[in-house]
Image: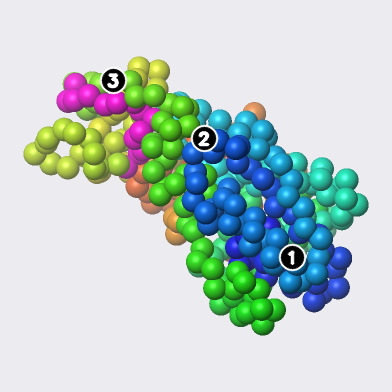
Amino acid sequence: MSGGVDSSATAALLLEQGYEVVGITLKLWPQDCVSRAEDKCCGPQAVSDARAVCHKLGIPYYLIDEAEQFQRKVIQYFADEYKAGRTPNPCVMCNQNLKFGRLIDRADQLGAEFIATGHFARLERKNGRILLKRGRDLKKDQSYFLFSLRQDQLARALFPLGDRTKGDTRELARHCQLKTADKEESMEICFVPDNDYGKFLEQAKLATRHRGDIVDKQGRVLGQHDGIEFYTIGQRRGLGISSAQPLYVIDLDAANNRVVVGKEADLACGEFTVDRCNWIPFDTPPPSLEVTTKIRYNHPGTPATVTPLDGGRARVRLHAAQRAVTPGQAAVFYHDDLVVGGGWILR
């Protein structure tokens, strides 16, 4: 329970359905957390709200300290990816390692059969497998962030909001007189204040500014940067160089500490490789798949042919080139509403 309306409504809905429910908030922040936003899931107000909801519903509530694991599996990963010239996706890693990793261990200790969250996604049991599908409310669908869950993790999961809209969810919370019913939701990374990840990395002493060259595709030096960690693919503003035409970050060369810039057309990409693939409907994928691929969470999706390779990799050929395919982000494959699988975009 994050202290938001979605997890609050989830608890209420499960009670209506006859489940015995226990509310748990994972304490993911260290005592010296640089994020002091009260309404974040790493803030004291969130804990207070979650506890109040559980009290209203008459269910037990536990605050479980997983700060060490969160620091190691999510925050350190977040920093390491930026240092390597990649753009991380901490929400996927948190779901994989904390919410459906460590929390399953805690559920076993409590004798709980399932882990329920407020994700807008659906599960279907078919032919001995657990299938992951988009949430009915496509504007709020969060199946992208769950693509890496294994069958044993999905078997323990419940997503009660999967068939509901955000409006339905708030109405349910209002009906139950939960204090989170009209609480504003945050679209930012939970541990990054003001969505300023560079400031977070510096304040948390996870990255320091260090000079390097900004170069064009031919390797000509156009200016200086303060660290590749503070740039992302597709970035245009804040480059500190003048040019007759707009320049964009098209590559981050960690090995040589260089930011590579080019024209907007240079951001177009039609083919790339992903690794650490997870296939949900099958153990062994077919030789080729025709799918819709999302290259980031807010991407609408585009038709693609995916060819699985050895070593957990796959080749993705987009039928139409897309802008700013970003190393470190997840490419998630869909067939209609079904999540076929996905992998991590390589440089």
326 versus 251 height, above or below: below
Pointer 3 with pointer 2, Cβ within 8 A:
no
> Which element type, helix, strand or loop, lies under badge 3?
strand
Q: Position of residue 20 (x, y in %)?
A: 86, 65
Q: Is residue 67 left or right of residue 188?
A: right
In this figure, which residue is indicated by the disc labeled 2? 78
Residue 148 seen:
no
- Residue drawn 17% across the image and 25% down it: 222
> Which element type, helix, strand or loop, lies under badge 1?
helix
Q: Which amino acid type corresponds to the residue marked 2 in the rendered image?
A: Phe
- Residue drawn 68% across the image and 58% down it: 1
> Residue 54's mark?
1
Q: How many marks?
A: 3
Pointer 2 with pointer 1, Cβ within 8 A:
no
In this figure, which residue is indicated by the disc labeled 3? 212
Q: Disc 2 to disc 1, how far (Cα)? A: 32 Å
| Residue 179 forms part of the magenta stretch | no
> Which element type, helix, strand or loop, lies under badge 2?
helix
Label 3 environment density (alpha carbons within 10 Å; few <14, some 14–19, many ≥20): some
Q: Position of residue 109 (x, y in %)?
A: 88, 45
Q: How is the image coloured?
A: rainbow
Q: Earlier in the sequence, mark 2 or mark 1?
A: 1
* Extreme-left residue of the structure: 244
- Residue drawn 50% across the image and 46% down it: 36
Q: Disc 3 to disc 1, how far (Cα)? A: 52 Å
Q: Quadrant of residue 5?
A: bottom right
Q: Earlier in the sequence, mark 3 or mark 2?
A: 2
Chain part drawn in magenta:
221-234
Q: Which amino acid type corresponds to the residue marked 3 in the rendered image?
A: Gly
Closer to the eye: label 3 or 1: 1
Residue 108 seen:
yes
Q: Quadrant of residue 306?
A: top right
